[in-house]
Image (cartoon, rainbow, N blue to C red):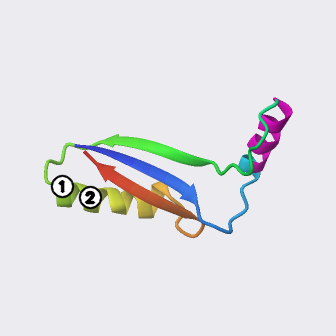
């Protein structure tokens, strides 16, 4: 089973990398960009075939390592 995980900064958390990208886009001539937020994307292949067990394992991985849950949110898609 494959898990796709999207990790993003929580609202209100400063995003200096997003601001730098926003500024760079403006200097490259891309007008009208009102904000950029950066994040991370992971794909994990699991040997587990039971969807509930796979989801529980991925949630533990996110809580313990993949996401800093103090400042980041995560979304899981199993397929």
Quarter assignment of residue 31: top right
- The residue at which mark 1 appears reads as 51
Residue 46 as seen in the image, left or right of residue 5 = left
Quarter assignment of residue 24: top right
Residue drawn where x is 19% and y is 61% of the image: 52
Quarter of the image where the C terminus is located? top left
Of 36 and 42, the residue lying toward us: 36
Q: Is residue 66 above or below residue 79?
A: below
Residue neighbourhood size for the residue with mark 2, other residues' Cα within 10 Å, grouped as few (<14), some (14–19), many (≥20): some
Marks 2 and 1 in Cβ contact (< 8 Å): yes
Q: Residue furthest top?
A: 28
Q: Residue furthest front?
A: 32
Residue 38 as seen in the image, left or right of residue 3 = right
Q: Secondary structure at mark 1?
A: helix
Residue drawn where x is 44% and y is 43% of the image: 42
Of 5 and 29, the residue lying toward us: 29
Quarter of the image where the N terminus is located? top left
Q: CA distance from mark 2 to mark 1?
A: 6 Å
Of 77 and 68, the residue lying toward us: 77
Q: Residue 55 bears which disc, if any? A: 2
Q: Position of residue 11 (x, y in %)?
A: 63, 67
Q: What is the span of residues highlighted in magenta in the rendered image?
A: 19-28
């Amino acid at each position: 089973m494959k898990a796709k995980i999207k990790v993003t900064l929580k609202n209100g958390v400063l995003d200096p990398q997003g601001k730098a990208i926003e500024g760079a886009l403006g200097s490259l001539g891309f007008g009208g960009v009102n904000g950029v937020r950066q994040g991370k994307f992971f794909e994990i292949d699991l040997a587990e075939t039971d969807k509930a067990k796979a989801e529980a394992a991925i949630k533990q991985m996110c809580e313990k390592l993949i996401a800093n849950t103090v400042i980041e949110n995560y979304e899981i898609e199993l397929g």
